[in-house]
Image (cartoon, rainbow, N blue to C red):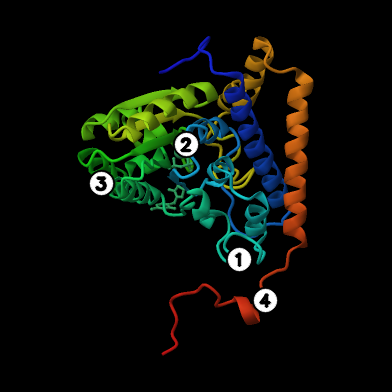
Amino acid sequence: MTTVIGEQVEVEVLRDLHERMVRIRLFETEAGRLMEAGRLPGFLHLYVGQEAVAAGVMSTLADTDQITSTHRGHGHAVAKGANLREMYAELFGKVTGYCHGHGGSMHINDLSIGMLGANGIVGAGIPIAVGAAFASAYRDDGGVAVAFFGDGASNIGTFHEAANLAAVLRLPVVLVCENNGYAEFTAQANHMLLADVADRAAAYGMPGEVVDGMDVVAVHLAAKRAVTRAREGGGPTLVEAKTYRYYDHQGVKGLRIQYRTQEEIDAWKARDPIDAAEARMIERGDSSRAELDAVWQRVREEIAEAIAFAEASSDPDPNTDLLRDVYTGTNA
Ligand SMILES: Cc1ncc(C[n+]2csc(CCOP(=O)(O)OP(=O)(O)O)c2C)c(N)n1
Ligand SMILES: [Mg+2]
């Protein structure tokens, strides 16, 4: 596993990584709070705990690079620069949302920033990213695509087909497996025999790298290597980030099934990616506690303003909005 204890990144990079993580954390904790209060319809698969992966990878991408996401996609969208107002509005089911309230959490997308979509079908985003990489290679536009997916998704056929095609065509794509140790309520040891998803890369002739997904600098550096390799024509890389979700599979508390021990949860929380980044920044003298608090405050205000926008927006009108953007009509 790549460790970067002592390895340096520039102060601006670390500040950027930190702020991206704080924005995801606050977006998600507020979304969880609203859900618990019964204010949001639909499912929410929250990203709290995994922030270093989205922040670390997205910090290496150009705005024109493209990503595909998962059912647990808010963090990817936030880190790619999605509009927080439209995101919350979509979670509330309002007309001002990204999908005009038709889609909800698992359909948020924004092609203008290269966010090709969350996806409720496990594994479905991976071939879409490979397709986007194929298009970039075909157009010779220098673009890179990144597919985010979970440990569970690495058992799905689409992963294997897409990885093989990406490798054989040497496409500019990075496959980022966010291994949080569980597929819903099934521990990794019960859904695959490998310890490292990254080992699957060898089957397709591409490099595979395991990285500490709680260390945002480690993720940033691993992603930078993989993205550079992809952009320079070296083909795909499989990056596996070992991470953990603090909340349940869906929602905050979710089901009352005891599938994780409190000791395990506490051990991962003790390695919280934001706490670790802040400790590093203070220790290095990059930022004072007051400066870091100011970042939290600024982002908190941004989030509150976005939620207020969503709350003040209209619900869809069944008379005019029900069939809007519905393309499978029965009209002759
Ligand atoms: C094709 C498909 N099969 C099953 C499901 C139900 N399902 C939703 S999330 C999930 C687990 C996915 O695990 P993983 O890929 O590790 O992602 P995580 O939830 O841990 O982020 C499953 C089985 C689905 N949505 N799509
Ligand atoms: Mg998982």
Quadrant where the N terminus is found in the figure: top left
Camera-side residue: 154 or 206? 206
Question: Residue at coordinates 63% horizontally, 15% vertically from top-left?
Answer: 280
Q: Earlier in the sequence, mark 1 or mark 4?
A: 1
Residue 124 x, y percent position in the rendering: 38, 52
Q: Is residue 204 left or right of residue 209?
A: left
User: Label 4: how many residues lie within 10 Å, few (<14), some (14-19) or many (20+)?
Assistant: few
* Contact (Cβ within 8 Å) of mark 4 with mark 3: no
Picture layout, residue 314 above or below residue 181: below
Q: Compare residues 42 and 203 and report the one nearer the observer.
A: 203
Assign a secondary structure to mark 4. Answer: loop
Q: Please, what is the three-letter code of the amino acid marked with disc 4?
A: Asp
Q: Which residue is mark 4?
A: 317
Which of discs 1 and 2 lies nearer the camera? The answer is 2
Q: Amino acid at mark 2?
A: Leu
Residue at image position (65%, 67%) is 95
Q: Earlier in the sequence, mark 3 or mark 2?
A: 2
Pointer 3 residue:
161
Give the amino acid type for the residue marked by disc 1 in the picture.
His
